[in-house]
Image: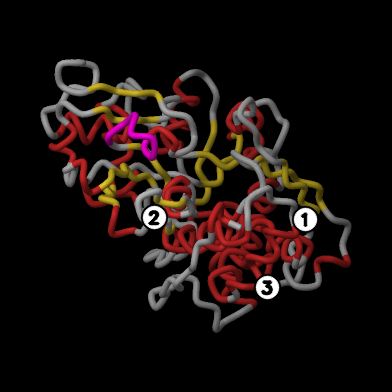
Amino acid sequence: MKKVLVMFLIAVIALGAFGVGAQDEELVPVRLQLQWVAQSQFAGYFAAHDLGFYEDEGLDLTILEGAVEIVPQQVVASGGAEFGIAWVPKVLESNEQGVDLVNIGQVFQRSGTLQVAFVESGIETVEDFEGMRIGTWGFGNEHELFAAMRAADIDPENPDDVTIVLQPFDMALLVNGEVDAAQAMTYNEYAQVLEQINPETGELFQPEELNVIDFNDVGTAMLQDHLFVNADWLAEEGNEDIAMRFLKASFRGWIYCRDNFDECAEIVLDNGTTLGESHQRWQLNEINRLIWPSPLGIGVLDTDLWDQTVDVALEGAVINEAPDESAFRTDLAEAALEALLADFPDLDVIGEAFEPIEVELREGGE
């Protein structure tokens, strides 16, 4: 059935009902709820919007910025947006609480979560957390960390094993020596350390002064940024096609940001980000690392990584039961990629040859 849908949607594109030239049709208004404010984490969507890729697909997209009090799952479930972005375990948790959201595009192929310590702490592995002060943001961001500690026979709920410290969304506690290791995203908080002056040297902190634990290497990484919709909305007539066109334009935006780094970074800066230029360039470079390469094609879910995410979520009691197969679909992303290649046969949707660039951070991320 899914294969039939893929072929049908591609046929619609081929007949010219949508795709290139669709800007001559009446645009369909849709909304995308981000999980945070404008920054390079969402660069592909801003690029696709500003370059007219959504209009090419007959869509009039409004990008809704996030905030601390905004939960994308709630916004999409209540009809406040057709599309949302969030981490996979957070959506699984919301579904178990009674909503019905569907992963239709897995943009990030790997986790961006790190635990960062100064070299002098002696922390090199998760096993070294024992007896230490370990920072985490909490609020559902701790699952990879806690799963890793349990695998190392460290109970995060036992203060005799480890002291868990709730940290703010910055690295002040680490820099001030109030925690021995702090939680960070590759594209944000890790850079915040490298943007600060080391008082002992008078220069910016350097990567070699830090030990970094990557949960992709540890084996407890969970899938993060993905595109999801309300199952009821998706079931309405015509909305599968709208979703496919939205994915097509979004993927095109991310490919543009991979292949046109400087131009994409400028688009983010032009969209009112409050972060500095060097920080945004660092962030875009790291986001590209999380997306590329995409072995199955950008946006297509790797079911092995899905299973690992579910296993960690179950082990950490994020969810009580494994989700059924309706929690994700790959057919819409696959149809979007085939339609994209029909329009642009030479487009690289996998990015096997992707190489990150060198980004020089400046003090304060300026």
Q: Name the quarter where the C terminus is drawn.
A: bottom right
Q: Nearer the viewer, residue 128 or 220?
A: 128
Tell me the SS state at disc 3: helix
Q: Earlier in the sequence, mark 1 or mark 3?
A: 3
Residue at the spot 17% in from the left edge and 46% down from the top edge: 124
Q: Which residue does the numbered mark 1 point to in the structure image?
A: 59
Residue type, label 3: Ala
Q: Which residue is mark 2?
A: 205
Q: Position of residue 94 (x, y in %)?
A: 49, 25
Q: Nearer the viewer, residue 291 or 269?
A: 269
Which residue is painted at 57% across and 82% down in the image?
A: 345
Which of marks 2 and 1 precedes in the sequence? Answer: 1
Horizontal and vertical percent for residue 181? Answer: 29, 37
- In the depicted structure, whether residue 130 falls above or below residue 328: above
Question: How packed is label 3: few (under 14 Cα within 10 Å), some, or many (20 or more)?
Answer: some
Q: Which residue is mark 3?
A: 14
Q: Nearer the viewer, mark 2 or mark 3?
A: 2
> Which segment is the magenta one?
174-180
How many labels were placed on the picture?
Answer: 3
